[in-house]
Amino acid sequence: MIEYPDVDERKEALGKLMGFEQAVWMQVGDYQRVRPIANEDLDRTTAEKKKKTSAVAFPAFFELTPDMVAAAKAGAAIKAGVDHPNYATELTLPQATRDSLAQDLK
């Protein structure tokens, strides 16, 4: 979650984060990064000349291959991140979070 409590700061940040939802990724082990599949029925930008992204964005799911699922269940590291030019970060999921996610995969 990224939060901008100040209204003016939030408005400025949202203008710089256009396309943020396409910049989110997850990676299992050494496999290729996977981008989330979002709810396509929700517009992520304002109608007024596409000046900013939505204040609320959420990926629907990450579609992992069977090999990725098997690797996660076998203990492979899982990373998550964002590679947007105005907001970039990545982390390796903590063991407990990784284990919980791997248990949920089918």
Image (tube, helix red, strand yellow):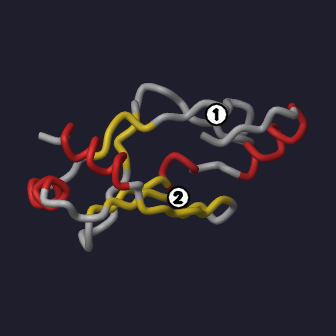
Residue 90, image x, y percentages: 51, 63
Query: For the N terminus, which image quadrant?
Result: top right
C-alpha separation, residue under disc 2 versus residue under disc 1:
16 Å
Give the side of residue 37 with respect to residue 12, left or right: left
The 10 Å Cα crowd at callout 2, few under 14, some 14 to 19, many 20 or more, is some
Hey, what amino acid is under mark 2?
Answer: Val
- Contact between marks 2 and 1 (CB within 8 A): the answer is no
Which numbered disc, 2 or 1, marks the residue that appears first in the sequence? Answer: 1
The residue beneath circle 2 is 82
Q: Residue furthest top?
A: 41
The 10 Å Cα crowd at callout 1, few under 14, some 14 to 19, many 20 or more, is some
Q: Residue furthest bottom?
A: 30
Residue at the image point whose x is 80% and y is 38% from the top: 10
Residue at the image point whose x is 26% and y is 68% from the top: 29
Give the side of residue 99 with respect to residue 59, left or right: left
Residue 102, image x, y percentages: 22, 47
Give the side of residue 75 with respect to residue 91, left or right: left
- In the image, 97 versus 54, the foreground residue is 97
Disc marking residue 54: 1
Hey, what amino acid is under mark 1?
Answer: Ser
Residue 47, image x, y percentages: 67, 30
Q: Residue furthest right?
A: 8
- In the image, 65 versus 77, the foreground residue is 77
Quadrant in which residue 60 is drawn: top left
